[in-house]
Amino acid sequence: MSTSTTSTQKRGFHFADIKKMFGGGGTSSLRQFGILGSLIVIVIFFEITTLMRNGANGATLTSGNLINVINQYSFILILAIGMVMVIIMGHIDLSVGSVAAFVGIIVAKSMTDWNLPWPLAIVFGLVVGALVGAWQGFWVAYVGVPAFIVTLAGMLFFRGAQQWIGDAQTIPVPKGFQIIGTGYLPEVSLPLNFNVLTMVLALLAVAWLVFWEIRTRRIQRKMGSEMAPLWVSVTKVVLLAIVVLAAGWMFANGRPGTSFPVPGLILLALVIIYSFITNNTVFGRHIYAVGGNRQAARLSGVKDRWVDFFVMTNMSMLAALAGMIFVARSQASGPNDGTGWELDAIASVFIGGAAVAGGIGTVIGSIIGGLVMAFLNNGLALLGQGADIVSMVKGLVLLVAVGIDVWNKQQGRPSLIGFLTRKRNKPDAPNLTDFPKSK
């Protein structure tokens, strides 16, 4: 083994190596560890409090409750995936709830009034969402109107359009369409007391974790970069595998007819796709570059207007998908659909580590932030608290999460959110000299 390679991997136990366990290997700086720790604390707190209240079993970590959390909050998590890209760019989108409701009513009427088959209705809804996003993206990217103003106008316009088209009435949707909101992985004809496909999905997730860790270490060894000790990688994979398998087992052992929900499958696919886009593509690096320093990115050849346009278009497409999932779960489109969704999505992104000024944020962090909000809602509901208490707690959590970060900056200390979300040994904004020049 070469000298450069042997010097990149520490031998023996070092307490500092523990901080590398949750950062994707290498010399990561606890990326998302604090946010994930907060989620774990919240889940444990509500499990204990519901256990003390019920006197028998906690109500949070049960199969039925976990399934309900995924079904009830998957559309907010989908919005958070698109919203984090918008916020990284330094924008904000206030229209996502109205756009989701607008697409939902159009898709519902297309199936009831125009007899459009539900698979085509889904495609039609995505197209409508893309057109709405392109309209808003045009004003932001090429006219130069701030996204806050454009999407505020969109929030008002599309909310009114939704109620005008639906005549403020409830429009039911057919059974086939409802599968994207209420469906589950099907049962397999085997003499087993759990859903086989759900456990297969969990095993595939564990296999992917093992593959990704091995791949990461091989890349680090090839590049000669510092590697975490082997025991750190093994411990990390084992802990994550236990969590994944335990969650899979709970989903697989729900009440008869349930398993891992279809909305969860859609969310999982989107997390994988958008994590790859933001972390492993030139376009993803352009998003961080423009958000971190627009002028520098422009001078390096990045087409910042095109990036603005695509991010806004993409956000409305995801809003359209979230709206359709909600309508499918509700079995009808109603006049109050989408109310307040934009606030939950924005809160999820900021709690998940995004910076107010842009340039910092991750898809995984936003999903964790969204789960924090979801389990807060769910746990308070299990304790019998009303919507007023839930709203106050959510507001305080958001204020504290951002307030601590701002206070640390004012005191000259490292930004907590930036510390938890910065890249390995480099800032979130990538090196602009690595970008291809525009032609």
Image: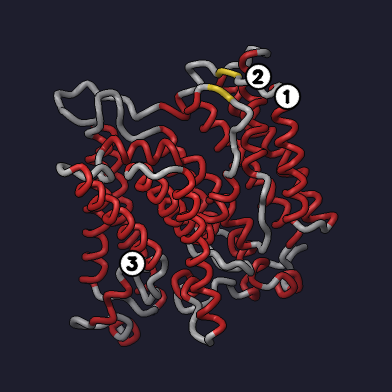
Count of numbered marks: 3
> Of tags 3 and 2, which is closer to the observer?
2
Amino acid type assigned to the residue bearing label 1 in the image: Ile
Q: Is residue 260 above or below residue 346?
A: above
- Quarter of the picture containing the C terminus is bottom right
Q: Earlier in the sequence, mark 3 or mark 2?
A: 3
Mark 2–mark 1 CB contact (< 8 Å): yes
Instruction: Say what amino acid the circle numbered 3 marks.
Output: Phe
Residues at marks 1 and 3, CA–CA distance in whole angstroms: 48 Å
At 73% from the left and 39% from the top, the residue drawn is 132
Label 2: how many Cα within 10 Å (few below 14, some 14–19, many 20+): many
| Left or right of residue 83: residue 369 | left
Return the x and y of residue 137 as percentages of the image width and height: 75, 49
Front residue of this view, candidates 244 and 325: 325
**Outermost right residue:** 143
- Asked if residue 1 shows in the view, the reply is no
Q: Position of residue 155 (x, y in %)?
A: 71, 43
Mark-to-mark CA distance, 2 and 1: 9 Å
Q: Report the disc number at residue 109.
A: 2
- Foreground tag (1 vs 3): 1
Residue 365 x/y as whole percent = 46, 59
Q: Is residue 256 left or right of residue 373?
A: left
User: Can residue 170 be seen in the rendering of this structure?
Assistant: yes
Disc 1 target residue: 165
Mark 2 element type: helix
Name which quarter of the figure residue 211 lies in.
bottom left
- The residue where tag 3 is placed is 22
